[in-house]
Image: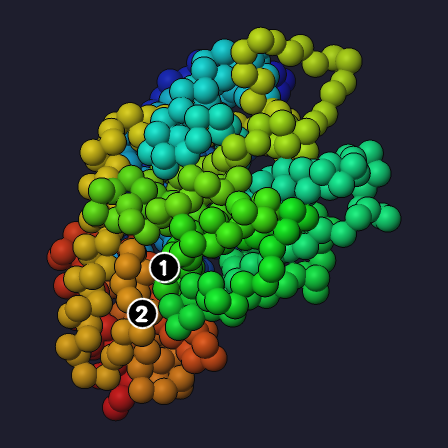
Amino acid sequence: MNTQDRLFEDLSDKSLFEQSLAHGLAYVEQALDRHLDPRAQDLLLLEHFKEALPIEGVAAKTILQQLHDYGAPNTLPMLGGRYFGFVNGSAVPAGLAAKQLATFWDQNTAMYVLSPVVSTLETVVQEWLKTIFQLPKRSVAGFVSGTSMANFTALAAARYRLLQRQNWDVNEHGLFHAPPIRVVTGKHAHSTVLKAVALLGFGKANIEWVDVDEQGRIRVDHLPELDDRTLLILQAGDVNSGAFDDFETIIEQANAANAWVHVDGAFGLWAAASPQLRHLTKGIERANSWATDGHKTLNTPYDSGIVMCEDEEALVAALHMNAGYLVLSKERDNMFYTPEMSRRARVVELWATMKNLGVRGIGELVENLHQRAVQFATHLQQIDGFCVLNEVVFNQVIVQCENDELTDQCIQAIQQERVCWVGGSTWFGKRIIRVSVCAWTCTATDIERTLASFERALEQVRK
Ligand SMILES: *Cc1c(COP(=O)(O)O)cnc(C)c1O
């Protein structure tokens, strides 16, 4: 059979897609209660993937079976409630299901003419996000892969505007011989902010670093003088402590100096969705750009990042492209708000997740993450040998054992227990265990099981 005939046969073979769904459902069923880190016998299965590209194509069903048998055991079950690594999220079922449906649509979202539904959903979700975060009405949103790209895109808009004010068109003339712009940020800025600074040609060595307090917040009294060629980058949610900068005070100063303010709110911006936690993001509405993720706090499936900007002209100009073959329309052409032209319809699952939860549900989801983090920190403090170092203002808990060596050994012992998954990091020069509560699936019982595992792990390394 020739290849095209074989592919048509696959497309009409419902049982192929039913097999994929059955494997997916089997996965979800066990993901909530599975061991975390893959075991040694699981890792051995990865050998099956290490082969040369076959000359003759392999049957689709065989391939799906291979993924299920050898791939699935080597995933980390982030859907479940005891994955506390990095800052991750689970996925709300409506979002997962919507993503699955949109997979079949297989839309390219660049322009309205390519996908009227996606253009419409991006317009709608943009409005919803402005309401949730209480941002200025004129703001626009771009739907990118994550906060890395959202930071990058927002800083590109800032670069365009700060140079344009000095009569310099960065798109035409680049940074060679450009008038200087300043980049000011806190010493705890996220690594992806630094990556964006490097990619955009600002140069990391040119950053004016501001001291932070013991929680990782920018020290307002250490801010340098700001001016209208300054890009100031603030943070809603320190990646370790979850701390929020004092937006109200800092942005007031920045506004007075006409500096550009960007807020990296990868997970923390969602505090604005909760009446109980909204005080943390007070003042963000007076910034110029914001970056956040759907795939962290909101629990959309991967990948989902959002850039928002109150200066539409700067954002669109920074991302400008044109070519004779483009078909532009009066409706939203999505590619003007993102660096990419072709990309998938990730707004579908973002839309579905937000609609499924509603304003109240999003608030409750965020509060649950906070409450579980507080539960964990409160009880861990009572176990001899653990010390919680941060104020648990949001979803992050920083834990220390008696010394660095013990902390690192404890992380290893926790991972080997496979009851939960936690990361390690360094906090003001000391080794720490980072616990990020970010999955909607996390229950009080998950926290109890995690506490028991921490206790056993420490007991074991002390022996
Ligand atoms: C996770 C994170 C990022 C990067 O976001 P991605 O979605 O991983 O690209 C940036 N800033 C902060 C504070 C984060 O927590």
Crowdedness near tag 1: few (<14), some (14–19) or many (≥20) residues, C-alpha within 10 Å: many
Front residue of 346 and 152: 152
The x and y percentages for residue 336 are: 62, 25
Front residue (pair 286, 309): 286
- Density class for disc 2 (Cα within 10 Å; few <14, some 14-19, many ≥20) is some
- In the rendered view, does 6 fall on the left or right side of 85? right
Q: Residue at x 25, y 90 (%)?
A: 463
State whether label 2 is within 8 Å of ligand 1.
no
Which residue sits at x=70%, y=64%?
Answer: 205
User: What amino acid type should be assigned to the residue bearing mark 1?
Assistant: Gly
| Image-quadrant location for residue 374 | bottom left
Q: Above or below — where is 12 with respect to 417?
A: above
Left or right of 304 in this view: 156: right
Residue 66 vs 432, above or below: the answer is above
Image quarter in which the N terminus is found: top right
Q: Residue 342 location in percent, x, y?
A: 61, 26
Q: Amino acid at mark 2?
A: Asn
Pointer 2 with pointer 1, Cβ within 8 A: yes
Q: Which residue is mark 2?
A: 390
Quarter of the image where one finds residue 447: bottom left
Mark before the other along the chain sequence, 2 or 1: 1
Depth check: give the residue in front, 231 or 326: 231
Q: Which residue has dot 1 on it? A: 242
User: Secondary structure beneath disc 1?
Assistant: loop
Residue at 78% in and 37% down: 167
The numbered mark at residue 128 is none
Callout 2: SS: loop
Residue 268 seen = yes
